[in-house]
């Protein structure tokens, strides 16, 4: 399909010998739901730079990971740099949090989870 000379062109891309996944699959790590694990691991509120509220308690990133160590082990049983899947989480922001602190803290979460903003 093509729309005008400067418009949109959609073409079929073939898998190359150097990579790509068959069936149009992306190179993203699959969600853990796709592998039969939990659809949503937890909800959290970013309270400050590197600070997360989880189940009524404020924690740092390592404490947050520790709270879900068993589930994270299921996503990466051999402790490889690339896990088999990533869990989805819901992330909210405390009112008044600076954009800089929010982005810094959200990036940390996105290194291990698929973070959804409500």
Image (tube, rainbow, N blue to C red):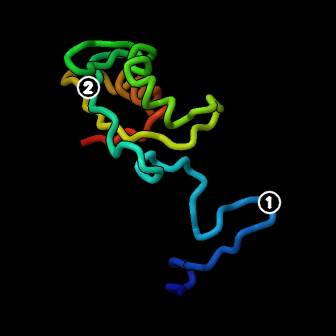
Q: Estimate how packed mark 1 is, as few (under 14), some (14 to 19) or many (20 or more) residues with alpha carbons within 10 Å.
A: few
Against 66, residue 87 (above or below) is below
Q: Secondary structure at mark 1?
A: loop
Q: Secondary structure at mark 2?
A: strand
Residue 36 x %, y %: 42, 50
Labels 1 & 2 near each other (Cβ < 8 A): no
Which residue position holds label 2? 45
Q: Earlier in the sequence, mark 1 or mark 2?
A: 1
Q: Quadrant of residue 58?
A: top left
Residue 86 x %, y %: 48, 40
- Give the tally of numbered discs: 2
Q: Quadrant of residue 68?
A: top left
In the picture provided, is 118 more to the left or to the right than 88?
left
Q: Residue at x 54, y 85 (%)?
A: 2
Residue 25 x %, y %: 57, 63
Q: Residue at x 47, y 30 (%)?
A: 72
- Residue 18: numbered disc: 1
| Quadrant location of the C terminus in the rendered image | top left
Q: Nearer the viewer, residue 117 or 59?
A: 59
In the picture provided, is 94 more to the left or to the right than 105?
left
Q: Residue at x 40, y 49 (%)?
A: 33
Against 9, residue 106 (above or below) is above
In the picture provided, is 44 more to the left or to the right than 20?
left
Q: Nearer the viewer, residue 50 or 99?
A: 50
- Residue 34: numbered disc: none
């Amino acid at each position: 399909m093509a729309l005008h000379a400067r418009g949109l062109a959609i073409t079929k891309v073939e898998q190359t010998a150097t990579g790509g996944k068959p069936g149009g699959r992306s190179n993203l790590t699959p969600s853990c739901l796709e592998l039969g694990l939990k659809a949503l691991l937890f909800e959290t509120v970013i309270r400050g730079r590197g600070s997360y509220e989880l189940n009524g308690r404020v924690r740092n990133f390592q404490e947050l990971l520790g709270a879900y160590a068993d589930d994270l082990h299921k996503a990466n049983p051999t402790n490889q740099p690339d896990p088999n899947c990533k869990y989805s989480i819901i992330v909210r922001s405390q009112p008044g949090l600076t954009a800089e602190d929010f982005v810094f803290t959200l990036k940390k979460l996105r290194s291990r989870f698929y973070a959804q903003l409500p």
